[in-house]
């Protein structure tokens, strides 16, 4: 597959088959995702792979709506940055997570994105506090997003080409 095909076919998926994602596959994808650009080659991004059913159930209760679907997800990856290593940890997390989503698609895996960089759980505690309490992530590490990953239950429609010319500006806005 060409990268353009992968981008066109990648869609947010929230319904997954009850099929385990192999750790070896995840580690390979995370290795390639880690090859994303890094300011001063600092590589401040780290990953917490959550594949234990009890922990995933806990995550599914984090929010009243946006995380309920995690109950049937076989694996969730927390992307986080070491804030002491780089001031661009947030951007680097976002790039690594985006690379990961494209790489997962290439392996016939599907993903979605849950922002946890700021905000509160349905229990009114910050995402940071919740993730520290339940998963042990402490400063200087800062959570950025959760990426659920698995094999999709049903097909999704590819994106359609569109005219981008109204959004492209040359030399001045």
Image (spheres, rainbow, N blue to C red):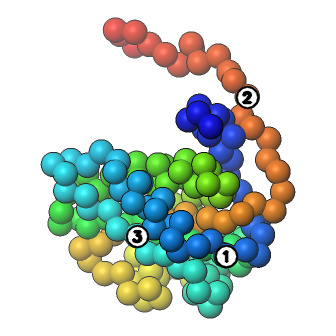
Counting from the top left corner in percent of width and height, residue 148 is at: 60, 66
Q: Residue at x 64, y 87 (%)?
A: 53
Q: Nearer the viewer, residue 124 or 13?
A: 13
Give the residue at mark 1: 20
Which comes before the other along the chain, label 1 or label 3? 1
Q: Quadrant of residue 19?
A: bottom right
Which comes before the other along the chain, label 1 or label 2? 1
Q: Residue at x 71, y 78 (%)?
A: 71
Give the residue at mark 2: 160
Q: Quadrant of residue 136?
A: bottom left
Q: Nearer the viewer, residue 10 or 127?
A: 10
Q: Quadrant of residue 85?
A: bottom left
Residue 152 seen by the camera: yes
Counting from the top left corner in percent of width and height, residue 151 is at: 71, 63
Q: Is 19 situated left or right of 61 in this image? A: right
Please tell me the numbered disc located at residue 131.
none
Query: Up-down: is 90 above or below 171?
Result: below
Q: What distance separates the C-alpha of mark 1 from that of mark 3?
A: 18 Å
- Secondary element at image label 2: loop
State which quarter of the image contains the C terminus. Answer: top left
Counting from the top left corner in percent of width and height, residue 134 is at: 47, 88
Counting from the top left corner in percent of width and height, residue 7 is at: 60, 38
Q: What distance separates the C-alpha of mark 3 from that of mark 2?
A: 32 Å
Q: Is 154 situated left or right of 94 in this image? A: right
Please tell me the numbered disc located at residue 47.
3
Q: What distance separates the C-alpha of mark 1 from that of mark 2?
A: 31 Å
Which comes before the other along the chain, label 3 or label 2? 3
State which quarter of the image contains the N terminus. Answer: top right
Q: Residue at x 48, y 49 (%)?
A: 98
Q: Residue furthest top?
A: 171
Residue 127 seen by the camera: no
- Secondary element at image label 3: strand
């Amino acid at each position: 597959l060409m990268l353009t095909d992968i981008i066109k076919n990648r869609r947010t998926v929230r319904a997954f088959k009850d099929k385990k994602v192999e750790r070896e596959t995840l580690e390979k994808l995370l290795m390639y995702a880690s090859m994303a650009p890094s300011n001063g080659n600092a590589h401040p991004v780290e990953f917490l792979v959550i594949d234990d059913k009890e922990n995933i159930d806990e995550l599914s209760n984090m929010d009243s709506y946006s995380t309920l679907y995690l109950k049937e997800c076989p694996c969730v990856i927390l992307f986080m940055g070491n804030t002491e290593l780089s001031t661009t940890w947030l951007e680097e997390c976002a790039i690594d997570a985006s690379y990961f989503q494209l790489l997962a698609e290439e392996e016939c895996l599907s993903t979605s994105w849950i922002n946890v960089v700021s905000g509160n759980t349905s229990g009114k505690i910050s995402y940071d506090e919740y993730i520290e309490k339940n998963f042990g992530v402490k400063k200087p590490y800062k959570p950025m997003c959760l990426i659920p990953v698995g094999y999709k239950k049903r097909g999704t429609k590819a994106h359609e080409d569109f005219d981008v010319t109204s959004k492209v500006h040359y030399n001045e806005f």
